[in-house]
Image (cartoon, rainbow, N blue to C red):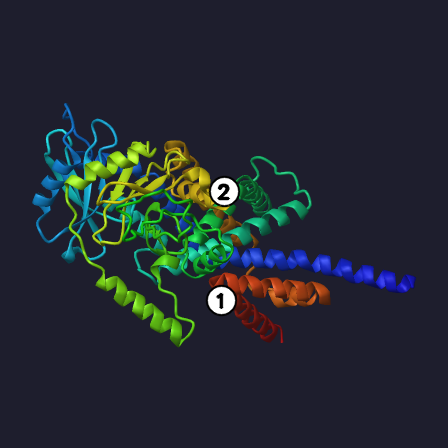
Amino acid sequence: MSDKILAHSARAEQSRSALLPLLRRLHFYIGLFIGPFIFVAALTGALYVMTPQLEAALYSHQLYTSSQGPEKTLAEQVRVAEEYIGPDATITALRPAPTAGETTRVMFTVPTKGSATTAVFVDPHTLEIRGMLNVYGTSGVLPLRTTLDYLHQSLLLGEFGRNYSELAASWLWVASLGGLLLWATSRAPEKIKKGHRSRGQSLLRHRYWHSTLGVALLLGLLFFSATGLTWSRWAGENISSMRSHFGWLTPSVNTLLSPSSEEHHTPSALSAHSETGEHAGHAVPMSGDETGEHAGHSVPASRNIPQQPADEHAEHKMQAMSMAEESVAKVAILPEQFDAVVKTARDAGISAGKIEVRPSTRADKAWTVSEIDRRWPTQVDSVAVDPRNYALLDKVEFAQFGLLAKLTRWGVDAHMGVLFGLPNQLILAVFALGLCVMIVMGYRLWWLRRPAAGQGPHPAETLLYHWRKLSVSARFLLLVGVVALALSLPLMGITLLIMMVIDLLRWQRANRVAA
């Protein structure tokens, strides 16, 4: 009996001793092959979060005015903007001047501009047109930040380029937690001697600073990875499906107008409809359901990409719904309606200085007024208003959000550097640039530890070799975990397979050299 216990203990010890080399080899491969993608994502992200002040200076003529005096009505401002842009444009949103010295932004869709929205900037005091710019997403990101956002998200390569940022986010948390475990289980390093420039001392210095930076930045790196995945293409769809399944989506106002709504209006209870949003700063389809400031991170993929019908009956039903939507009568948007709709919203408690009014040309849809000041984590209330008699139809307050919806809202805004303004920007920049420095140190470590010329790598230093050293139960559990992660994070699964193929080819080559 004691022999069996000793044998089991020996196998367990051998399994534990094989796990750390396996983790170390995986950490090395992530740094070597995925490190460049993480570096680019961190650097472009740091550039993005530090641009609001630069953008404010670059577009100061459009955004600000020195005029004083009473403000004109919203109807007058909208009418001037419509006359300036021409009859072919359709108004899609209005952002009244939030404070004195700022302009009103009237946004239009123009047939010749594609997906971009054109904003006309109006001086609310004199009705002077201050300029016209393309803006993106519901947050209205201007051209400079839009370009940097697409650079961060897709390297300006379109849908294909989005894979790079998803790959970085998929592996960042693994590299961070793996590095923490390696740091915690490693023996104390030899004393670093100041002034010594030997290869060994240089190796110790770089290892110390690499691991110290990793531990110091750990929480931020996990945050980057988690929030970045919500905007990704493949993993983001899985996250969105999970949130929808468990009812964790962010609630939105009910904008459906009933035929009898003119006679009787009562604000409904919290409407948990799956709202449509845009990530203007990350402005391509994404999987989250949050309205953000990124031009490329703001469109939830779950809303932007139609789901495939489960059967023929469902397909016919979807076609019927589409035909019904096309048959809904269109109504004109009148400038006079904006003042009355905003008054109803203000009376209902929409108190933020920055608001956005979204009209509807559909006869069965209400207008919405939303708070858009992301510097404060609670100013995201919204209401639906009937444009026919300006009655309040529905209201959703941030206080009614579920805990996960609140955390998602805060996470989105913090990732983009808009939560609390400048402090958020500085913190993100420090973490992103620190990550870049850590990656550079990791490459320096690899260079210092590379095998001497002519020796070549040891054939046993492979992922498969260390995995086979684990116990049967440990291998099974690890395999189940890897398969689950590969299905949830497809790009992680694909690149892990590539790493294993490289491992195998490397092992075969080393054996041929040894023979």
Q: Are marks 2 and 1 in contact (CB under 8 Å)?
A: no
Which secondary structure, mark 2? helix
Closer to the camera, 82 or 152? 82
Which secondary structure, mark 1? helix
Residue on which the image places disc 1: 494
Q: Amino acid at mark 1?
A: Ile
Q: Amino acid at mark 2?
A: Gly
Res. 451 in view: no
Vertical side of 24 occupied by 483: above or below = below
Picture residue at 43% right of the left edge, 60% below the top: 237
User: Which percent across, then down, holds residue 449?
Assistant: 57, 54
Res. 170 in view: yes
Closer to the camera, 411 or 187? 411
Q: Residues within 10 Å of mark 2 (few under 14, many from 20)?
A: some
User: Which percent across, then down, holds residue 278?
Assistant: 32, 51
User: Which percent across, then down, holds residue 308?
Assistant: 39, 69
- C-alpha gap between disc 2 and disc 1: 26 Å
Residue on which the image places disc 2: 220
In the rendered view of the protein, which quadrant contains the C terminus? bottom right
Vertical side of 180 occupied by 54: above or below = above
User: Which percent across, then down, holds residue 317?
Assistant: 35, 70
Which residue is the extreme one toward the front?
263
Vertical side of 509 occupied by 48: above or below = above
In the rendered view of the protein, which quadrant contains the N terminus? bottom right
Closer to the camera, 343 or 412? 343
Picture residue at 65% right of the left edge, 45% below the top: 184
Name the N-terminal-most of marks 2 and 1: 2
Q: Residues within 10 Å of mark 1 (few under 14, many from 20)?
A: few
Closer to the camera, 290 or 362? 362
Q: Is residue 287 left or right of residue 471?
A: left
Q: Is residue 252 left or right of residue 20?
A: left
Number of callouts: 2
